[in-house]
Amino acid sequence: MKARVHVMLKNGVLDPQGAAVRHALGAMGFDGVNGVRQGKVIELDLADGASEADVTAMCEKLLANTVIESYTIEMS
Amino acid sequence: MRAAVVVFPGSNCDRDLAVAMEAAGAEVSMVWHKDSNLPDDIDIVGIPGGFSYGDYLRCGAIAAQSPICQAVAAHANRGGFVMGICNGFQVLTETGLLPGALLRNAGLKYICKTVGLKVETSNSAYTVGYNAGDVIDIPIAHHDGNYFADEATLAELRDQDRIAFSYTDNPNGSVGDIAGILSENRRVLGMMPHPERAADVGHGGTDGEALFRALVGALATA
């Protein structure tokens, strides 16, 4: 079982890296981009018995800082 | 006054902090991140600047889960004093001992320079050596010092006079120009600027000295 965790800055939290990427895209001539948000993807190779609830606990305690970040979990 | 300074892999201001505390009259012991207990009879714990655990995942995130940080949290929850400088501030927000978070600098660049700091309150063991409104020169050196907190948290910090220091010329995008904050009981301080780097004439500035002197004075008589 694998879990893929997507961590993004919450809406309303300034994302200067995303803004810099958008600026760079604009400078390259890609002017069809209104905004860029940059996040991270964390892949977990889970041992037998580990559940989505366990991954949620991992997100709450370590993988995301819920003061500034939101997360989604994909199990596969 | 007895102090402990925590050393993580990647800490690089640990000895500077210990020297500044010792110069002010504290007896300092260094504590390794894998230790699960603080030395007995510790008055204050210092969490130093640096790049604990390589800043992996988020600055301070891994350090916040280390064995020693559980002991630091227990110390703070018992009403003990804790000061976190730079990476130490990031660690304290990650442990939840202080509210908010430190984001990447708004200008994306690592900034290393001396900045003006306004002392917002003299009502703490850390700032009692200054007058509210004083402007002091203290160096900053960080990539992720952009303080963020939601509106409700900011209002609470302001209402409770818990903003310790603010930038006179905001270098990193911090909300409300905030450079350092206090816990609700005023015993936990987190600040991005480095007072320990302005505590000796050899540093080129001594405006941070009063913080350590006041702290040692306040805790010695406590």
Image (cartoon, coloured by chain):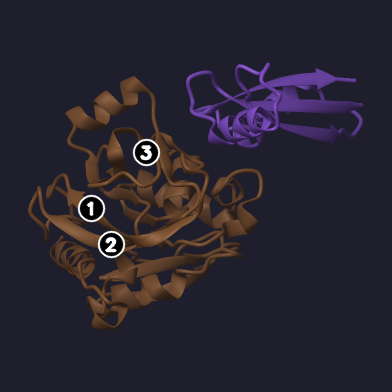
Chain colours: A purple, B brown
Tell me which amino acid carries mark 1: Leu
- Pinpoint residue B47: horizontal percent, then vertical percent: 43, 59
- Pinpoint residue A12: horizontal percent, then vertical percent: 48, 20
Tell me which amino acid carries mark 3: Ser
Mark 2, chain letter? B
On screen, residue B178 versus residue A70, left or right, reads left
The residue under label 1 is B117
The residue under label 2 is B138
The answer to whether one can see residue B37 in this image is yes
Q: Which mark is residue B174?
A: 3
Q: Are marks 1 and 2 in contact (CB under 8 Å)?
A: yes
Identify the residue at image location x=18%, y=28%: B159
* C-alpha distance separating marks 1 and 2: 7 Å
Q: Is A41 above or below relative to B111?
A: above
Tell me which amino acid carries mark 2: Ile
**Are labels 2 and 3 assigned to the same chain?**
yes
Identify the residue at image location x=62%, y=28%: A22
- Say few, some or many: other residues with alpha carbon within 10 Å of mark 3 (under 14 / 14 to 19 / 20 or more): many
Closer to the N terminus: mark 1 or mark 2? 1
Identify the residue at image location x=36%, y=47%: B171
On screen, residue A15 versus residue B25, left or right, reads right
